[in-house]
Image (cartoon, rainbow, N blue to C red):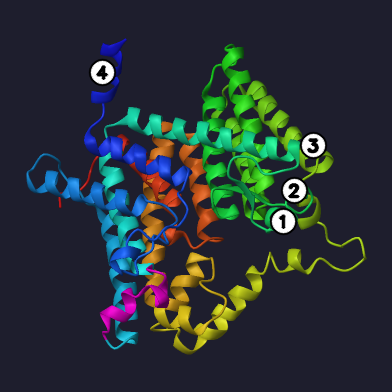
Amino acid sequence: MILDIKKFIFKYSYIDWLIILYLLFIIIPISPINIFEEINLSFSLNFRTINFLIQIIILSIFFLEFITKRVNFNINWFKKSIIVLFAYSFFISLIKQDFNLEKILEYSNSDYYYLKYFLNISTFFVLINQFINKDKLIQYCKNLIINSLVIISFLFILSQFFGYPVLGVSDAAGVFTEKGFIDNLYSRFTIYGWNANELSLFFNFATAFVISKLVKNNFENKFYNIYNLTILIFLINGTILTGSRMGLITLILSFLISIIFIIFKGSFIKQNIGKLIFLISFTSARIGFFPNVFLKRFAFFYETGEVNKNLIQLGGKLNKWQDSLNYGSNAVITGTGVIDFVSKTNSGLPENLFLELLVTSGIGGLILFLIVLFLFIKENIVYIKQSNDLENLLLTFCLFGGIISLNIFTIKSFWFVLAICYAKTQLQYKQIEKF
């Protein structure tokens, strides 16, 4: 037993274990605390977690191993394009602020936008480097994501059942804190300070992992089928209770894409489509017949007969996008810079990466991002064709859903799953230029 534990521990390197710890604190973020308050440094961990410190440790250890030639760091055009995009966006903001670096890095001006951005892409590169040739580490991380979200969904169920939040469960709409109990038709469930839309995206990622396993599985293994279907029921329930429209749309698209994939694959068509029809039926029944916020959020009319303007405006996103375009229309070529945009608009960043880069970095920033997107999709298509891989196909749509609905540059869960998705493409073929 002791030998098995030691074998398990030493199977992963120091960085691998730090990556697992990093993921754990992405899933269960610690509340914001001001670690440096007593020494008079205004550096509160507004990152929502202690993962800022873990990222610094991961990057430091990786850098030391790189300079001592214990690890190789390879870089290709996809990574280069991400670096160029970051540098271009930063340079635009620097110009707009008359090269005042202190103003760009000040928390009150940008919420540490570029610091978070830099740390996330740097960690993303390390994650890719560690995931390549380490399929077991990828599987361990995916299982940790899936199992953790099943537990979170179970806590949501308990909270609904008892009518009171359980073990860190809270409400994005503030119903819990105002009334002290749960309103099943208005509460948007979340946990430990997660943004409900970000948590819904994480549920989408986990659902993509499990659907791909369900479709891969031989139909004769009934226990494994039942197990995966049960896991998916929990994940679907969690997605619904977060109340994210984009989360639900992505979930439905995942079902449809899976059905199309199964038909073209031509393997166990009836059995696999039968599983997905069951999941679609469960999703429909869960939304239509049991309490959840979608009964209100997707209603075209309120009980009073008034039009649901929140639905028409996509929860305020359309107004935010219009305001962003109006503000950025005066600087389409060069962009406004992130600092000016954040400080001079009340709506915050537009929660759409295409629009965010167009407004803050101009046409140049948008073109660079389209290049990044093209390179990612190109390599992914090659991988999916060669490996017949449903998982990466579903993850690509989930990632795109996040791109058009969230401020993803600062969302660690997005970058973590993107690293898994991209690393898998490099496991198939390794034509990567050395740094």
Q: Nearer the viewer, residue 420 or 383?
A: 420
Query: In the drawing, what numbered circle is on residue 182?
Result: 2
Neighbor class of circle 1 (other Cα within 10 Å; few <14, some 14-19, many 20+) is: some
Q: Is residue 107 magenta?
A: yes
Residue 6 location (% of width, % of height): 25, 18
Residue 313 location (% of width, % of height): 71, 69
Q: Is residue 251 above or below residue 78?
A: above
Q: Which residue is mark 4?
A: 7
> CA gap, disc 4 to disc 1?
48 Å
Q: Among all residues in the image, which is located at the extreme front? A: 38
Q: Nearer the viewer, residue 194 or 206?
A: 194
Can residue 336 be seen in this snapshot? no
Q: Nearer the viewer, residue 28 or 424?
A: 28
Residue depicted at x 52% and y 27%: 213
Report the label total. Answer: 4
Residue type marked 1:
Val
Query: Which element is circle 4 on?
Result: helix
Q: Which residues are magenta?
A: 99-112
Q: Which residue is mark 3?
A: 285
Q: Which residue is mark 1?
A: 175
Residue type marked 3:
Ala
* Quadrant, the N terminus: top left
Q: Among all residues in the image, which is located at the extreme right? A: 304
Query: Which element is circle 1 on?
Result: helix
Q: Based on the displayed image, in which of its 4 quarters is residue 221 positioned?
A: top right
